[in-house]
Amino acid sequence: MSDLVRLEVTDGVATLRIDRPEQLNALNADIQARIAAAAREADRRDDIAAVVLTGGDKVFAAGADVKEMADLGYAEMAAQSARIHECFNAVAGIAKPVIAAINGYALGGGCELALCADVRFAAQNATLGQPEIKLGVIPGAGGTQRLTRLVGPSRAKEIIFSGRFVGAEEALRIGLLDRLLPATEVYPAAVEWAKQFVGGPRLALSAAKQAIDLGAGVDLATGLEIERQLFAGLFATEDRTVGMRSFVENGPGKARFTGR
Ligand code: DAK
C-alpha cells in the first residue's frame, strides 16, 4: 500500500487514510485505485469490524484531480469513469459500518467519497460542496444520486446547480453531516463510534447495511421483501442463536458474538 493511501488497523477498527495534503488530497487515478484496493481489503479482513475514512486533520479531499483531468478527451474519460465508479462503489460496498471523519474541505469527488460512508462526523470548520458545475461538468462519482437520496432533490439541485460551498452547520442541518466537533476531536470521535462494532454481530450489521442501501433504490414492496429475506437468512448464523439464547438466559445486552 502506498503512503498516499494507507489502511491502518488498531483493535478491530481500520482507518483508511488519504495522505496527499499538499494537493489537498486531490484524488488522482493512482489514489483512486489504491482507495479501491484498501476498501476491498477492509471488506475482506475478519479482523476489521468497522472503518474510519479520513484525509487527516487539515483536509478530507478537495475533489478529483482537476490537473490530471484537464486535458483528457472523451474516450479517455469514458474509460476512466468506470474506474472511478469502481473506487467509490468499493467504499460504499464495504459490508461493515463506515464513518467519514471530515476536516477541512470535502469537495466534488471528496464530498462524493464522504457520501459513500454510512455516517459523517466533521469539524466545525469543514466545508462541503459539489463545485463541478464551475468546471463545466456535473458530479460524476455518485453526487447526483447519493446526495439527492440524503438531502432530497431540491436541496441537492440547489447545491449542485450553484456549485456553492456548504458550511458545516448547514450541512448538519440538512442531514449531509451527522455530528459536528472541534477539529481535533473529529477523528477520535469517529474511532470511538467505530469501536462499538468490535465484537458485534458482524453478519447482522452487514445485513442491516445491505437492507438499507438496497432498499433505498427500490419501491417499498421490493424493499420489504429484501428485508424479509435478509432477516430470515440471519437465522442461519451462530450470532443469532447466541444473541437470543443469551437474552433468554441472562437478559438483554450480554451476548458474546462470534461473527459467524
Ligand atoms: N485537483 C487538483 N489539485 C487541487 C485540487 C483539485 N481538485 N484542489 C486543490 N488542488 C491543489 C491546488 O492546485 C494547489 O496546488 P499547487 O498550486 O500548490 O501545486 C494546492 O492543491 C493547494 O490548493 P489552493 O492553493 O487552491 O488552496 P486554497 O486554500 O487557496 O483553496 C480550495 C482551496 C479547495 C478552495 C481550492 O483549492 C479549490 O477550489 N480546489 C478545487 C475544488 C474543486 O473544484 N473540486 C472539484 C473537483 S472536480 C469522474 C467522477 C467524478 C469526478 C471526476 C470524474 N468520472 C466519473 C470519471 C470528480 C470531479 C471533481 O471532483
Image (cartoon, grey):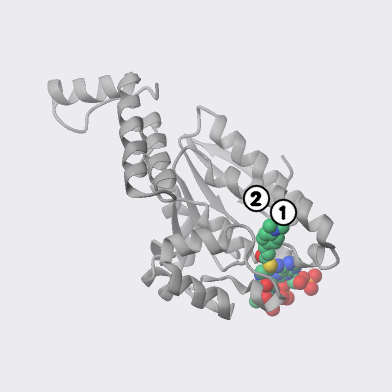
Residue nearer the viewer, 235 or 202: 235
- Tag 1: Cα neighbours inside 10 Å, few (<14), some, or many (≥20)? few
Rendered residue at 60%/65% (across/down): 58
Secondary structure category for the residue under label 2: helix
Amino acid at dot 2: His
CB of mark 2 near ligand 1 (< 8 Å): yes
Secondary structure category for the residue under label 1: helix
* Residue 60 shows up from this direction: no
Rendered residue at 56%/30% (across/down): 44
111 to the left or right of 63? left
Residue 230: image x %, image y %?
36, 31
The residue carrying mark 2 is 85
Rendered residue at 84%/63% (across/down): 72
Residue 87: image x %, image y %?
65, 47
Amino acid at dot 1: Ser
| Image quarter of the C terminus | top left
Q: Quadrant of residue 223?
A: top left
Rendered residue at 56%/36% (across/down): 42
CB of mark 1 near ligand 1 (< 8 Å): yes
**Would you place residue 66 above or below residue 90 in this image?**
below
Give how far apart the Cα atoms at labels 1 and 2 are.
6 Å
* Residue 244 shows up from this direction: yes
Residue nearer the viewer, 43 or 256: 43
Residue 258: image x %, image y %?
37, 22
Q: Ligand 1 is located in which of the four quadrants?
A: bottom right
User: Are the residues tagged 1 and 2 within 8 Å (C-beta)?
Assistant: yes
The residue carrying mark 1 is 81
- Tag 2: Cα neighbours inside 10 Å, few (<14), some, or many (≥20)? some
